[in-house]
Amino acid sequence: MHATTPPSSRSQVLDLAISAIEMLRPVVVRIRQCDRDLGEQIRRALSSVALNIGEAIGSDGGNRVARFSTAAGSNAEVRAALRVAVAWQYVSARDVEAGEQVLDRIAAMLYRLGARR
């Protein structure tokens, strides 16, 4: 499937990953004020999503699938970390809702691009 995926889909998922960073940045800042380690972990994972997508765009074959898979794993890590932050009441579920919707879209796009789970 990934071999026939149009390049525009690949750049769209990168644009969406950048949008997720922009959208969640204020939430991450608030989380870092309560729990520096968790905030840093979310920041790194969000960056990893975008950077691995970028690397996948410049790769082919198995390397592309591996990078999309790594991006999908980091995306799942962000989603879990946001749930942890809500559970600790660092932020509210409403604070992360829009970001989670973008992360859901990214997960679906990465799956279509061939990410292995």
Image (cartoon, rainbow, N blue to C red):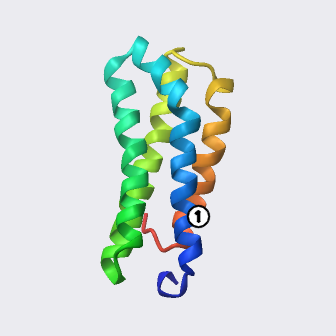
Q: Residue at x 36, y 59 (%)?
A: 52
Q: Residue at x 55, y 61 (%)?
A: 13
Q: Residue at x 55, y 33 (%)?
A: 24
Q: Which residue is mark 1?
A: 12
Q: Is residue 115 above or below residue 18?
A: below
Q: Is residue 115 left or right of residue 13?
A: left
Tell me the element at label 1: helix
Q: Is residue 109 above or below residue 60?
A: above
- Specify whether residue 73 is in view: no
> In the rendering, at what x and y percent does residue 6 appear?
57, 81
Instruction: Name the kind of residue labelled 1 in the image.
Output: Gln
> In the rendering, at what x and y percent does residue 33 appear?
42, 13
Q: Residue at x 41, y 65 (%)?
A: 68
Q: Is residue 91 above or below residue 103?
A: above
Q: Is residue 75 above or below residue 61?
A: above
> In the rendering, at what x and y percent does residue 81 appear?
45, 33
Foreground residue, 109 or 117? 109
> In the rendering, at what x and y percent does residue 29 appear?
46, 21
- Specify whether residue 26 is in view: yes
